Image (spheres, rainbow, N blue to C red):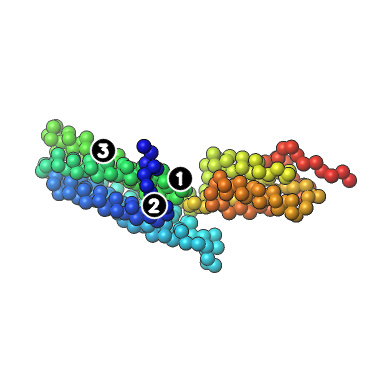
Amino acid sequence: MSVLSLPLPKTNKGIAVCSLLVSLVALGLKYAAWVSSGSIALYSDAIETIINVVSALGGLWALSVAERPADHNHTYGHYKAEYLSAVAEGALVLVTAFVIAREAVEGWLHPQPTLAPYIGIALNGAATALNLLWGLTMLQAGRARRSPALVAGGQHVLSDVWTGAGLVVGMVLIPLTGWARLDAVLAGLIALNVLRVGWGVMRDSIAGLMDQAPDPETIDQIRDIIADNGRGAIEAHDIRTRIVGAMTFLDFHLIVPGAMTVTEAHDICDRIEHGLRRQMGNTLVHIHVEPDNMAKHEGIVFWPRPETPST
């Protein structure tokens, strides 16, 4: 069964509230795992989960702001608040990586035997299973709803899953091998994984704040929608687009026959806009209509080409 078939709140903010609750439950399980075992690796994993809780709070704030309607100070809406939350989450993850690395070095220099590793393994395994289910749910819901905050949160939670799986294997090996420093090695690997995820979250979020163009597949989809709905026009060029959270911003020049009436040109624009919103969701479109003598013979050339009235 796909995780998207699970019942989810209708709003992104509702998902963020659920994420906070899941993070608190996972933190409780991992704290108990550390207390029962005394493992540095499990302690490091619990520290990372504290960041999950803080990130969930930040995501809840960002989604609350992003859902506000446009106002006189933010005429294009508040969608970029999600990117701010994701950047902050990435920064917290990077700080967490350095904290965990310090604990790993301390554990390597002064190794300590674990107390009850199998109890810690069981508790950490339960938290890992919970994170796997919820991380996949957040990631898929975030992509479906085009929410950077939910995607970043899902990626962070799933990074915790890889950490948890590695810890289960490693913690089983510690009593079998008798190598106490393996605990510190596991903590060091957790730090590297956290560092990798934090950098990825920050990179993607900064790209969104800098209005980076969407991926080629999305651009091709937009061009196809314009081409399918632009019958009666001659050409569409200078197409520019950016995606901010759940909103797509798009502008381009539309060339129409010089003898075409304003009403006919307006109907073509309406048809293109409806097609974009139907397939792309929330879309803010700006179309600059120009006569045929302004054609550049590039971009999207509609076919069949409208006939120019004879003079």
Q: Amino acid at mark 1?
A: Ala
Q: Amino acid at mark 3?
A: Ala
Query: In this rendering, does residue 171 appear at all?
Result: yes
On the image, the x and y values in percent for residue 163 come to 27, 41
Q: Earlier in the sequence, mark 2 or mark 1?
A: 2
Q: Which residue is mark 3?
A: 165
Q: Amino acid at mark 2?
A: Pro
Secondary structure of the residue carrying tag 1 is helix
Q: Which mark is residue 144?
A: 1
Q: Earlier in the sequence, mark 3 or mark 1?
A: 1
Residues 104 and 29: in front is: 29
Q: Whole-Å distance between the Cαs marked 2 and 3?
A: 29 Å
Residues 298 and 236: in front is: 236
Quarter of the image with the N terminus in it: top left
| Dots 2, 1 in contact, CB < 8 A | no
Q: Residue furthest bottom?
A: 72
Mark toward the viewer: 2 or 1:
2
Q: Whole-Å distance between the Cαs marked 2 and 1?
A: 14 Å
On the image, the x and y values in percent for residue 249 come to 57, 52
Q: Quadrant of residue 165?
A: top left
* Residue at point 13%, 32% (across, down): 176
Q: Which residue is mark 2?
A: 9
On the image, the x and y values in percent for residue 238 come to 65, 47
Counting other residues with Cα less than 10 Å from the Cα at mark 3, is it few (<14), some (14-19), or many (20 or more)? Answer: some
Left or right, residue 150 beside residue 95: right
